[in-house]
């Protein structure tokens, strides 16, 4: 290849010409080259008369700094005038000074989502991929969060679990808040997956509730577990603090504090709003409280409601028939029973047969109120509104004794059945809709299923094996 030629009249003053290199790989470098009658320097062709003009500057050309492939005669001539001469090395570069961009491969329909992000599952539309992910068992959701960031963001939002709930795929787990040892120890909590029948320890509760006592517990929205008030372990007295755990995000969050400091009070949920009432202020002498409050999650604030008819410290409460029934001790240690109606925002004293035989634990299922009829919870009774009396509805006839470990601590409704949770972490489920007295309707979800007779239970108590290692404070069901 030759550079642009010069005119014959330019023997003394050369004509400088720029040449764009679009040739072979020998032309792509910053060096010098001598080709015929043209002198190449730095990728630019200098059209000079050769050899008349170039001969005068032959000594100024340094072939040791050349990176191209030159002819041997030119290199030998330059070597005689230069002290050191090195062989030229030409890098293997592309043929063009403009590198070619790789051709983009045709994009398949499932390679990218509509938002430009990677799809949830390669090769599937996002709608179909989500339909597959929502059917994964809840016990494996923590594994899904580790796959990628987009899966983690999906499971951390409300859309994923809201879709599971609308399609009837949500699973209910039992959460037990307990204290290690009945008279002391730290507060911890475990979760029970009914499908696997085993308790699993959860991360510690918030620091302010690790040693607290007399705090309330309730569930809002089916997936938020609230811990409210209680005794401050560091400063003493009652607290206004409120925290909640989300079963969807698996994290604890702060909520607005209550308006009054409370401990040993009652709490319930009606109409997706959280109510608290009674208890003690935790001051000098433990003054009883008549005030009641309600928390609206839509407004994210607390507000006062009508005061109770009398100050009391509730020890059992339940929502039945659209009213909140509370039973506890009054200022003179007398037993009081009151009911709150949210429609009229008023409290009334209850003296009917319901509160007469009502004891803890209890739970509502399908509009009926059930309570334990024995200490181990193996026999249940229900309240009959027509007769205004309690009647035995189901009996397993397999009692576990009267020890502290076998004592029924809570009764919760789980998937249309009643579950009796004991201090030894054993759980028995019964289908109250089945025929009364049918032993096949009872099922052991966790813990040992053997029953103890009178003599066996007495010997266990004397040996100390019946002492409760845990004391369950609250038991709730969360859905996700």
Image: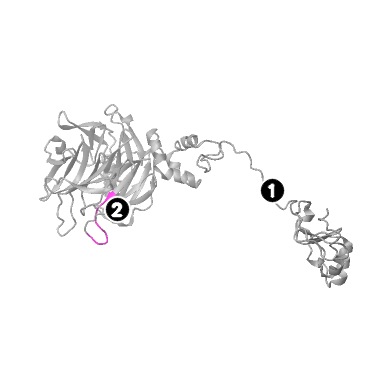
Quick one: label 2, few (<14), some, or many (20+) residues within 10 Å? some
* Percent position of residue 132, x then y: 48, 35
Q: Which residues are magenta?
A: 227-236
Residue in the picture at 23% in, 60% down: 236
On the image, numbered disc 2 is attached to which residue?
Answer: 181
Image location (x, y in percent) of residue 123: 56, 36
Q: Tell whether 252 sits left or right of 74.
A: left
Q: Quadrant of residue 409?
A: top left
In the rendered structure, the answer to whether residue 185 lies left or right of residue 21 reads left
User: Separation of disc 2 and disc 1 at Cα?
Assistant: 75 Å
Q: Residue at x 32, y 37 (%)?
A: 428
Characterize the magenta stretch by its predominant secondary structure: loop
Identify the colour scheme used.
Answer: one colour
Q: Quadrant of the C terminus?
A: top left
Residue 46 visible from this viewpoint: yes
Label located before the other in sequence (2 or 1): 1
Left or right: residue 238 versus residue 107 is left
* Residue located at (74% from left, 52% from top): 94
- For residue 100, the mark is 1
SS under mark 2 = loop
């Amino acid at each position: 290849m030759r550079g642009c030629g010069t005119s014959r009249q330019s023997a003394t003053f050369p004509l400088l010409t720029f040449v764009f290199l679009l040739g072979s790989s020998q032309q792509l470098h910053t060096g010098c080259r001598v080709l015929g009658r043209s002198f190449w320097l730095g990728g630019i062709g200098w059209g000079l008369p050769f050899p008349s003009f170039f001969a005068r500057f032959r000594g100024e050309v340094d072939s040791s700094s050349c990176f191209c492939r030159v002819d041997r005669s030119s290199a030998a001539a330059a070597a005689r005038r230069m002290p050191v001469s090195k062989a030229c090395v030409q890098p293997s570069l592309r043929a063009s000074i403009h590198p070619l961009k790789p051709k983009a491969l045709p994009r398949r329909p499932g390679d990218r989502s509509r938002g430009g992000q990677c799809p949830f599952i390669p090769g599937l539309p996002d709608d179909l991929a989500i339909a597959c992910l929502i059917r994964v068992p809840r016990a494996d959701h923590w594994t899904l969060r580790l796959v990628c960031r987009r899966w983690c963001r999906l499971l951390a939002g409300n859309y994923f679990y809201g879709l599971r709930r609308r399609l009837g795929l949500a699973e209910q787990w039992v959460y037990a808040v307990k204290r290690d040892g009945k008279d002391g120890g730290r507060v911890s909590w475990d979760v029970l997956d009914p499908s696997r029948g085993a308790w699993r320890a959860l991360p510690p509760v918030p620091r302010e509730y690790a040693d607290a006592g007399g705090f309330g517990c309730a569930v809002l929205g089916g997936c938020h577990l609230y811990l409210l008030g209680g005794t401050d372990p560091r400063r003493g007295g009652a607290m206004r603090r409120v925290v909640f755990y989300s079963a969807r995000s698996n994290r604890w969050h702060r909520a607005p504090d209550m308006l009054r400091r409370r401990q040993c009070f009652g709490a319930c949920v009606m109409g997706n709003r959280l109510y608290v009432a009674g208890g003690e202020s935790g001051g000098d002498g433990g003054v009883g409280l008549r005030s009641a409050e309600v928390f609206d999650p839509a407004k994210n604030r607390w507000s006062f409601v009508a005061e109770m008819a009398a100050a009391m410290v509730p020890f059992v409460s339940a929502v039945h028939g659209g009213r909140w029934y509370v039973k506890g001790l009054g200022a003179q240690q007398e037993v009081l029973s009151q009911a709150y109606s949210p429609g009229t925002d008023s409290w009334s004293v209850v003296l009917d047969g319901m509160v007469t035989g009502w004891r803890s634990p209890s739970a509502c299922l399908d509009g009926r109120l059930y309570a334990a009829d024995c200490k181990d919870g193996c026999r249940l009774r229900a309240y009959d509104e027509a007769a205004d009396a309690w009647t035995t509805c189901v009996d397993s006839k397999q009692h576990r004794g009267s020890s502290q470990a076998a004592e029924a601590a809570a009764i919760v409704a789980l998937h249309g059945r009643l579950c009796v949770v004991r201090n030894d972490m054993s759980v028995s489920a019964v289908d109250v809709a089945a025929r009364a007295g049918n032993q096949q309707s009872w099922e052991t979800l966790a813990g040992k299923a053997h029953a103890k007779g009178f003599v066996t239970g007495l010997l266990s108590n004397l040996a100390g094996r019946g002492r409760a290692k845990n004391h369950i404070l609250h038991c709730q069901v969360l859905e996700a």
